[in-house]
Image (cartoon, rainbow, N blue to C red):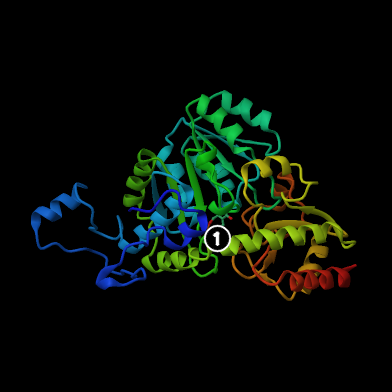
Amino acid sequence: MGQDKKHAMGTKAVWGGEEGLFEGNATQVPVVHSVSFGYEDMDEWLDVALGKRSGHIYTRNTNPTVSVFEEKVRLLEGGEAATSASSGMGIISNTLFSLLKPGDRVVSVKDTYGGTNRMFSEFLPRVNVDVTLCDTTDHAAIEAEVAKGCTVLYLETPTNPTIKILDIERLAKAGKAVGAVVMADNTFATPVNQNPLALGADLVLHSATKYLGGHADALGGVAVGSTELIKTIYSYREIVGNVLEPMSAYLLLRGMKTLYLRIERQNANALEIARFLEGHPGVEKVFYPGLESHPGHEIARRQMRGFGGMLSFVAKGGTYEDACRVLSGLRLARRAANLGAVETIAGTPATTSHVECTREERAAMGIPESLIRYSVGIEDVEDLKADLDRALRQDA
Ligand SMILES: *Cc1c(COP(=O)(O)O)cnc(C)c1O
């Protein structure tokens, strides 16, 4: 596709992958539900099947609607190629299983998304892949483990739910030195705020279910990287059948047209709310990389264009019950497991990101039971502040 590389993010979000007209001169991406694609000309069919000519054969392999979605994310992340899957965990598991074999070693951190953490603690060890999870805040310790040799260095930043920051450029350098494939889950930051490939990562992964789609109405996952790596992931996915539905691809594409606008607003709202909560008597601690008090603030300032819409905080009292009281008092927040939508969403790690873990495992990861995860929406920030203030005061 002829998308101009110099276009800025807001333009890419609207036009990326969609600059031509579609079938029947449609200006909007058609949802192609067809499972297969027919050919009158046997030579043309063979060429498409052999990859000599572009076209589609069967929707488990490629689909026109899904391809537009992959192309838009590819342009936003600035990579050579992209492939998708049925969900964020779909692309993460598919990527790990396609690139790893028995005897390989993965280095990652303790604070990855709960589902990813389960991959590391249960499913990869089952096929004899050795996984070492480091303290997320200790870059020297991560570098030391990477230096021992590994096949994959798996990063996620900002992390879920304590919003820690990893220095992608520094760690990617360490990974490259030992020939590891460096992966980064960019779900929280979005390509608007951070491009891991430009910082040295080999692969960037997204749960498109969150900010890319932005409306909490479609599941999806996507990976962007070199043509060679994406080909490996795609060939595995094609056989395993972990595919994105055309209707979901359409909903995600529709959401992505406003990605830039939404993220700009969510960055601004979250920073203002984080500052408000930091000064609130009903709050013990706030985790947000845009705050000067955040230990990862300097790194975040260097590698991010905005600090994102995710924050978390500990309500005064510090128990799970205190968190529940505040959560129950919120009127302008969905109490739900999702994040990254246009409406504000709040929950506790025990019911959201780390529902897969036991209380003891969460404690070992340094996740307080009293933590409230707050995904800031695009509402008027004054209304959100008033809502939080009321919920916190009724608690105090
Ligand atoms: C939600 C999430 C995932 C998993 O995505 P699904 O679409 O729910 O499968 C992976 N990583 C992060 C950071 C997430 O927030």
Q: Position of residue 56 (x, y in %)?
A: 24, 58
Q: Which of 60 and 50 is in front in this view?
A: 50
Q: Which of 387 and 3 is in front in this view?
A: 3
Q: How many labels does the image show?
A: 1
Q: In which quarter of the image is ligand 1?
A: bottom right
Name the residue located 43 percent from the left edge and 59 percent from the top edge.
86
Give the residue type at disc 1.
Tyr
Name the residue located 87 percent from the left edge and 73 percent from the top edge.
394
Q: Please, is residue 124 above or below residue 85 in the view?
A: above
Report if residue 374 is visible in the image. Answer: no
**Label 1: few (<14), some (14–19) or many (≥20) C-alpha neighbours in 10 Å:** many
Q: Position of residue 278 (x, y in %)?
A: 83, 56
Quadrant of res 344: bottom right
133 to the left or right of 253: right
Q: Please, is residue 389 above or below residue 124 in the view?
A: below
Name the residue located 46 percent from the left edge and 65 percent from the top edge.
252
Task: Say which residue label 1 marks.
Answer: 260
Q: Position of residue 226 (x, y in %)?
A: 40, 40
